[in-house]
Image (cartoon, helix red, strand yellow):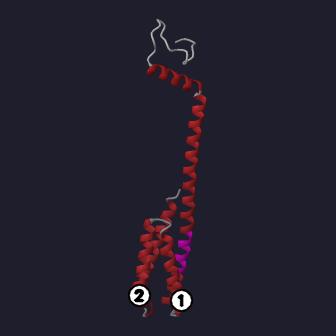
Amino acid sequence: MSSASPEQATHLADDQPIPPATRRFSIVHELVRQNALALVSLFIALFGLGYNTWRNETTEHHRNVRQSAFIALDALGEVQQLADTRFFGAEHSEANRIAIWGRVTLVRDIATLVSADTAERADALFAAWSGNAAAFDNGDAEAERAVAVAIREARAQVLADLQRLR
């Protein structure tokens, strides 16, 4: 087939008809050849759009995890201060108890946005405080240690999750 267009090329050189499958293939081949630059540009545009969307979603996820982690760290620090004040400072008021419950609950709720491991550590902190809140008022050193360890482990997990965001 020389310079004849695919529509005109319906016969071979010795006047035999071209099979329809071969004719369709030559038409498609000619269309691809004529529009190769447009097809490559379309592929590049679709790839770029896909990559940009993926990158934006990843960035947004990291931003959400980072913000949740900072809130969790702040609340963990407050829990530590309030618990220390309750245990070592003999601040046994209901306001102190309510404040600790509020912060421990906040840590448990926000930890689910950081990671599954952080959520487990926050649940362990919630359980440690639940099981030892009454013992704080009696000066039970084991109760204080259990809560302090749970706070330390939760804090370490949040920091590890932040390190992984690189």
Tell me the number on the disc at residue 13. Answer: none
Residue 23 place in picture, x, y as percent: 48, 19
The residue pinned by badge 2 equals 141
Can residue 71 be found in the magenta stretch?
yes
Q: Is the residue 158 above or below the residue 127 in the image? A: above
Residue 141 place in picture, x, y as percent: 41, 87
> Label 2 vs label 1: CA separation?
18 Å
Q: Nearer the viewer, residue 20 or 30?
A: 20
Q: Are marks 2 and 1 in contact (CB under 8 Å)?
A: no
Residue at image coords 52%, 58% = 165
What is the magenta range? 70-78
Q: Amino acid at mark 2?
A: Ala
Residue 85 visible? The answer is: no
Q: Is the residue 153 above or below the residue 94 in the image? A: above
Q: Amino acid at mark 1?
A: Asn
Q: Secondary structure at mark 1?
A: helix
Residue at image coords 55%, 46% = 50
Query: Furthest-top residue in view?
Result: 14
Residue 66 place in picture, x, y as percent: 55, 64
Residue at image coords 44%, 22% = 21
Can residue 89 be found in the magenta stretch?
no
Few, some or many residues within 10 Å of mark 1 (<14, 14–19, 20+): some
**Which secondary structure is most common in the magenta stretch?**
helix
Residue 116 place in picture, x, y as percent: 43, 66
Tell me the number on the disc at residue 96. Answer: 1
Q: Nearer the viewer, residue 38 or 101?
A: 38
Q: Nearer the viewer, mark 2 or mark 1?
A: 1
Q: Is the residue 81 above or below the residue 30 in the image? A: below
Q: Nearer the viewer, residue 57 or 72?
A: 57
